Image (cartoon, grey):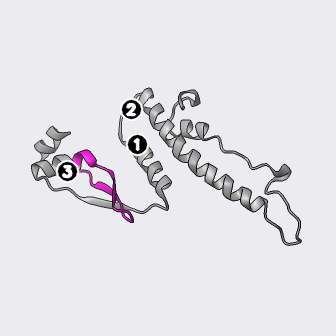
Amino acid sequence: MEDNLLTEGRCRDPLVLWSEHRILLDGQNRQRICERHGIPFKITTLDFSDRSAAREWIVLNQMGRRNLNDDQRAVLAARLRQVTSREAKKVRARNAGRANGKNGNGSNLPHTPGGKIRKRDTRVEAARQLRVSRRRVM
């Protein structure tokens, strides 16, 4: 990467910054190399609702821009699963709170039939998104 930046004398891809928090999400190596050699670079900003959304973008961005082997895709899928699993747990907890609340006529009604809140299979979701077997996603 350093050789390419020095040969071209410029950084083709902008660095990506989470605008609200001013956190660099993509381009740490390019930034370091450019600053070391005085090569100009551009910055683009993105907005995310929360840290989970930013982390999901990072993983999907890594997947989309690199030629990865199956092992590398499996690692990214595991990271994506962690992010989506945390988010799914938050949603289930929020929905459980609603399920235990009172409805308009004063009775307690569960959120779903039988009082169960359906779980997402984040392993399958991550594997499908990153094109690896679900067995490879930890």
Which residue was labeled with disc 2? 68
Give the residue type at disc 3: Cys
Q: Is residue 54 left or right of residue 86?
A: left
Q: Are marks 2 and 1 in contact (CB under 8 Å)?
A: no
Residue 80 spot, x, y in % from top left: 50, 42
Mark 2 secondary-structure assignment? loop
Give the residue type at disc 1: Gly
Mark 1 secondary-structure assignment? helix
Q: Is residue 89 left or right of residue 28?
A: right
Give the residue type at disc 2: Leu
Q: Return the disc, 3 or 2, that comes first in the chain's sequence.
A: 3
Residue 6 spot, x, y in % from top left: 11, 43
Which residue was labeled with disc 1? 64
* Residue at image coords 10%, 53%: 38
| Quarter of the image where one finds residue 85 | top right
Q: Is residue 132 above or below residue 14?
A: above
Q: Return the disc, 3 or 1, that comes first in the chain's sequence.
A: 3
* Residue at image coords 31%, 60%: 44
Which residue was labeled with disc 3? 11
Mark 3 secondary-structure assignment? loop
Question: What segment carries the magenta color?
Answer: 11-30
* Residue at image coords 54%, 41%: 81
